[in-house]
Amino acid sequence: MATQLQIVPTEILLDFDLPQREAAFFYGLFLRGHSPEELRRDIAVPPVVMAKWHREAERQPELRDLFTRMIEYRRHVLAIFDALVGTDGRPHRLQ
């Protein structure tokens, strides 16, 4: 019986369902004095990395969905972080 190669462990895929957890981690760093601009750069997927993933997806089409999901996940984390920090860089309380 042939086994199928699993590219990404299941627990990593499940982590994509919890962007709030990652946004909270970055928000904690913000509360400890890290610059919101610096943290936004850390959260976002840099254009160089996106170009590399695009080239990889061209070579291995089975990775395209994973890369798309990773990019959307990072965008979601960034949106949550922005909502927590607010546009003026001061923390906002969410109720």
Image (cartoon, grey):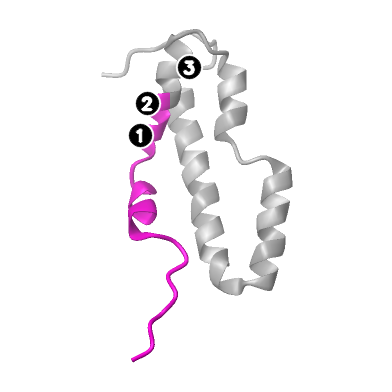
Which of the two discs, 1 and 3, labels the residue nearer the N terminus? 1
Question: What stretch of residues is rendered in magenta?
Answer: 1-25
Count the numbered circles shown: 3
Residue farthest to the front, as pictured: 1
Magenta stretch contains residue 95:
no
Q: Where does residue 47 sit, x and y in percent of width and height?
A: 71, 43
Residue 9, image quadrant:
bottom left
Residue 67, image quadrant:
bottom right
The numbered dot on residue 86 is 3
* Residue that carries the numbered disc 1 in the rendered image: 20
Q: Where does residue 1 sit, x and y in percent of width and height?
A: 33, 91
Q: Amino acid at mark 2?
A: Ala
Q: Amino acid at mark 1?
A: Gln
Residue at (51% x, 41% y) in the render = 74
Relative placement, left or right, of 90 versus 49 is left
The numbered dot on residue 24 is 2
Other residues around mark 1 within 10 Å, as few (<14) / some (14–19) / many (≥20):
some
Verify CB contact (< 8 Å) between mark 2 and mark 1: yes
The numbered dot on residue 32 is none
Residue farthest to the left, as pictured: 95
Q: Nearer the viewer's eye, disc 1 or disc 3? A: 1
Q: Where does residue 45 sit, x and y in percent of width and height?
A: 61, 41
